[in-house]
Image (tube, rainbow, N blue to C red):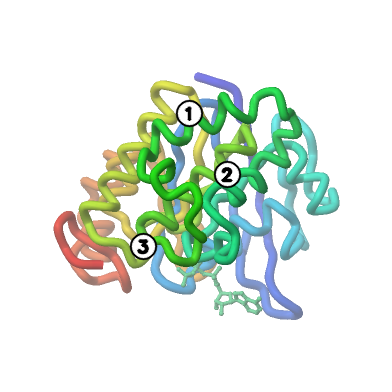
Amino acid sequence: MSRPLLEIKDVTAGYGRISVLHDVSIDVRLGEIVALIGANGAGKTTTMMTIFGRPRATRGRIIFDGEDITDLPTHEIALLRIVQAPEGRRIFPRMTVMENLQMGSIIADDPAVFDEDLEKVCTLFPVLKKRRDQRGGTLSGGEQQMLAIARALMGRPKLLLLDEPSLGLAPLIVKQIFAVIKELNSRHGLTVFIVEQNAYHTLKLADRGYVMVNGRITLSGTGKELLERKDVQAAYLEGGGEGALREGASP
Ligand code: ATP
């Protein structure tokens, strides 16, 4: 088994006096795709943002690559090359595709590799090459999501965090994007932590997954094990969980 890259250990966190996360423990090993699934408002985004210290864990520890990052300032955590691809509409809308990608490369901080990285992301998402001079805000939803992921990749992440990459996208585009994530992982060894409501595609993609309900981890297992569980199917795959999707269902 590979070594742990990210360890979230018994973390409690919230906003003001309200705790949203309760004793959350998740680990992501080098080379894995790990998913966190849960309904709307379960605390998935908060979990992801807690890695960056926004909000801070009030209990528990967060360890990245053997280093305790729980109390590090957010900008120092970003420098460790934990890179988040936010939900697609949070690209820079007034900047061109190329400028967005240049912004992403700031974290990598190595101008010598810019062209090489650009070529790589344009091979993964050929449409971005076609749209390179177009403003981000004029792209379709799917293209914006691709740009968000491509921008994150330009930062040469050690750990890629994906926040709801399927949100609001047509099933065909979701399939396309998830196929690229799979390729990044299997071919390039990229470690990925993905937070999603779209349980079906995500658990199919993930090596392991965690289920979050009201800020607590209630289940964990391999993606396959979770997909086969009747309770997960009932809550997240058959319309029981808000926003949960089956293959082919409209988002
Ligand atoms: P979604 O899929 O809707 O984004 P989620 O599982 O990612 O849901 P979070 O966004 O982490 O859930 O929200 C968890 C809870 O924390 C919700 O009750 C939400 O209202 C609350 N919350 C989120 N952000 C803040 C904030 N900045 N200030 C106060 N409460 C917040």
**Residue 146 image position (x, y, % from top left):** 42, 49
Point 81% across, 50% down: residue: 75
For disc 2, does the CB lie below 8 Å from ligand 1?
Answer: no
Residue assigned mark 1: 120
The residue under label 1 is which amino acid type?
A: Lys
Say left or right for 42 vs 51: left
SS label for mark 1: helix
Q: Of the numbered discs in the image, which one, if any, rests on residue 140? A: 3
Instruction: State the image coordinates of residue 57 (x, y, percent, origin top left).
Output: 74, 59
Q: How many residues crowd mark 2 within 10 Å: few (<14), some (14–19), many (20+)?
A: many
User: Which image quadrant: the C terminus?
Assistant: bottom left
Query: In which image quadrant can residue 11 be found?
Result: bottom right
- Within 10 Å of disc 3 (Cα), the crowding (few <14, some 14-19, many 20+) is few
Q: Earlier in the sequence, mark 1 or mark 2?
A: 1
Query: Which amino acid type is shown beneath numbered disc 2?
Result: Ala
Determine the CA span between mark 2 and mark 3: 18 Å
Q: Looking at this rendering, what residue extends furthest in the left direction?
A: 248
> If you read the primary sequence from the N terminus, does the residue marked by circle 2 or circle 3 appear first?
3
